[in-house]
Image (cartoon, rainbow, N blue to C red):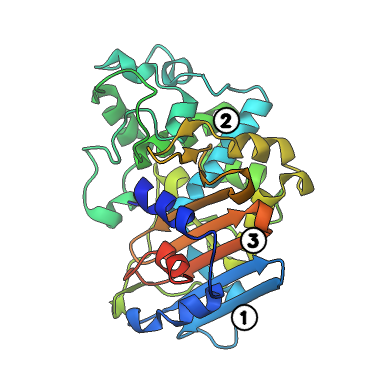
Amino acid sequence: MNRTLALVTCCLATLTSAAKPLAEAAESLTAKIPAGCIVTAEQTPQGTRFALAGKSPDPTQAPETLVFEIASLTKIFTGILLAEAVLEKKVTLETTVAELLGPACKYTDARVGRITLKQLSTHTSGLPRMPDNFSNGFKGYANYDEAQMLAWLAQVQLKQDGPQACSYSNIGVALLGYLVAKQYGKPWTECVLEKVCRPLGLTHTQPSHLPSLGPLAPPYNGDKPGLITTFQAFAPAGSLRSTAADMLKFGQALEHPERTPLNDALTLALQPHADANPNGGKVGLGAFRTGTAERLAYGHDGATASYRSSIQVMPAQATVRIVLMNNNTMEGSDVLKAMK
């Protein structure tokens, strides 16, 4: 989950003119992954292809049915959930933390209470990447709960009122998911399944604490068995698992919101809501944007302890690309870069 904005926006900006198919790019990198595999999905005007590079954990399974942790790609789902809540008038993008947590919550820094939901989703709240009461690396996600998050929120201090310059914040999106789900009176995990996954027909996508709806590609840390990451408070920032088939369908929904039952929510989520970097990149409610209208690309990278992922959607080119890996030796966007 510790991806940088520069990585996302740079890879998106350099990939609008690919020279080789995504599957070939993945195959060219197999020497760099000592175990596990790279599963890709690529839709272009020439057609759609699923492929596996490396060693399949189960050769009897089609590559697109294998389940992977998609890590921070989860943040796009949480942004769509926010958009749904706005359309249902449960919140607005300018609703503040203090409004939703109520007067019982006190803050050492009053500016924390003035953070808006839009700022949480666009990484412009001024909150750090991670809270200082979080420890134990990726293993720590399994034990860090909402009580710890709220206790940290009560004492954290900001440099200034938001919106601040875009700076990637896992804790910001974790808080966002908690606050939005609170308005529905349900856990985030139930909300994202009900409001996003099921309407989009993502039948093999669900949070990490539930059993996989398909064969889970085993995790690797280099050439050794890796760690499966589970989440509590950080679930809205990185807990979803999915398949290449589902993620391609998700990318197609981002490509053509009007073909889905979530047209208005997707359209709102994909609008540019803040600047993402000095080079003209923007960020929507979760997804990063780069390029002009004719070369617009949406995208995000993801990383958990032993999995890597990437999504790229270019509507004007009728192109969707998905990368899923069960090894932590490189980034999902490295496969996209290898297309050049």
Q: Amino acid at mark 2?
A: Gly
Residue at x-position 29% and y-position 76%: 222
Q: Residues within 10 Å of mark 2 (few under 14, many from 20)?
A: few
Which residue is under mark 3?
Answer: 319
Residue found at the far bottom of this picture: 59
At which x and y percent is residue 140?
28, 51
Residue at x-position 24% and y-position 22%: 159
At which x and y percent is residue 224?
28, 78
At which x and y percent is residue 337?
43, 66
- Which mark's residue is nearer the viewer, 1 or 2? 1
* Cβ–Cβ under 8 Å for marks 1 and 2: no
Task: Reply above or below: 139 against 155.
Answer: below
Task: Reply above or below: 257 against 327.
Answer: above
Q: How many marks?
A: 3
Task: Reply above or below: 87 against 188.
Answer: above
Q: Regarding mark 1 in the picture, which secondary structure is present there? A: loop
Of the numbered discs 2 and 3, the one sitting upstream in the chain is 2
At which x and y percent is residue 317?
66, 58
Distance of label 1 from label 3 (alpha carbons) = 22 Å
Distance of label 1 from label 2 (alpha carbons) = 38 Å
- Which mark's residue is nearer the viewer, 2 or 3? 3
Residue at x-position 61% and y-position 73%: 64
Q: Amino acid at mark 3?
A: Thr
Q: Residues within 10 Å of mark 1 (few under 14, many from 20)?
A: few
Q: Is residue 83 left or right of residue 201?
A: left
Which residue is under mark 1?
Answer: 62
Q: Regarding mark 3 in the picture, which secondary structure is present there? A: strand
Q: Is residue 180 left or right of residue 88?
A: left
Which one is nearer the viewer's eye here, 247 or 18?
Answer: 18
Which residue is under mark 2?
Answer: 185
